Image: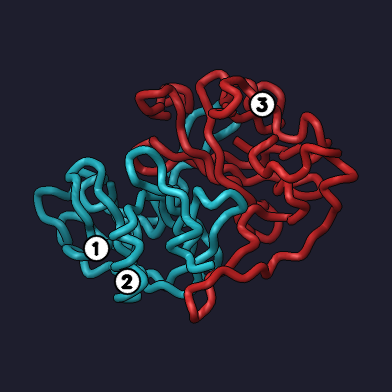
Chain colours: A cyan, B red
Amino acid sequence: MNILGEVKFDSQGLVPVIVQDVRNLEILMMAWMSKDALQKTLSTGKVHFWSRSRQKIWLKGEESGHYQWIREIWVDCDGDTLLLKVEQTQAACHLGYRSCFFRKMGKDRNLKILGKKVFEPEKVYGENSQRCTHEKD
Amino acid sequence: MNILGEVKFDSQGLVPVIVQDVRNLEILMMAWMSKDALQKTLSTGKVHFWSRSRQKIWLKGEESGHYQWIREIWVDCDGDTLLLKVEQTQAACHLGYRSCFFRKMGKDRNLKILGKKVFEPEKVYGENSQRCTHEKD
């Protein structure tokens, strides 16, 4: 069956989407798609999400140029989660890291930053750079 | 800061959790944790979720023996998604596949089963075997 008929959107019309680097299998981020965002992603080849904070469709990279280019789309067993394998331009995270998952729990249960910055947010986003959710969700 | 203070649970007290195979980086599944489920996961070393359908904490593998053993926990930039890297006993999916993401979209936008079955659900779960959500969510 066509993917649009297989995906089960929740009561708010959204589905969670895991984004994975198709090259090294690193998890880059998690965000949400509406049906329209999925359709736009399919028709353009570039990942579009639904921004819950801004209540509108958002092209990932629209401001930064850090696009995600669709290579594979997988659907889970009960159709309520998507897995996208993408080619990531530059970096996924607004804070300058390649992946939004740059903090790992240590033995003391505290979080430690292990990711390395690959760009300076101020140079890309200007004064909005501290808001990780700015372009993310 | 301690992980329990860093994670932002949503209005229902839940956080989405991505589960990744620590060995080959395959995405195994996505499910939800409550604060209690996260605490049980930390104290036992075995992944516990919150079952939205059954409204209770659920030890992944409690019926099948297909446990997920915590190796790494990562938190995303805005603290509202967890990434767990685990050692997966046998398989994550109730339908007998290693990963719940066993269906890939083809060029015709239809889904195709590409995963291989690694166990027979009837032998593990009996008559409940058709319900993927049975032990999942």
Q: The N terminus of chain A is located in which quarter?
A: bottom right
| Tag 1 residue | A59
Chain bearing mark 3: B
The CA distance from mark 3 to mark 1 is: 36 Å
Asked where in the image residue A11 lies, by quadrant, the reply is: top left
| Tag 3 residue | B58
Whether A70 is drawn above or below A75: the answer is below
The CA distance from mark 2 to mark 3 is: 37 Å
Q: Is residue B119 left or right of residue B35?
A: right
Marks 3 & 1, CB-CB < 8 Å contact: no
Whether B74 is drawn above or below A63: the answer is above
* A79 or B45: nearer the viewer: A79
Whether B53 is drawn above or below A58: the answer is above
Q: Residue furthest left?
A: A127
Q: Is residue A20 left or right of residue A100?
A: right
Asked where in the image residue B56 lies, by quadrant, the reply is: top right
Q: Are marks 1 and 2 on the same chain?
A: yes
Chain bearing mark 1: A
Q: Secondary structure at mark 2?
A: loop
* B85 or A103: nearer the viewer: B85
Q: Amino acid at mark 2?
A: Lys
| Tag 2 residue | A46
Q: Amino acid at mark 3?
A: Trp
Q: Residue visible at 57% across and 26% down?
A: B38
Q: Residue visible at 24% across and 63% down?
A: A59
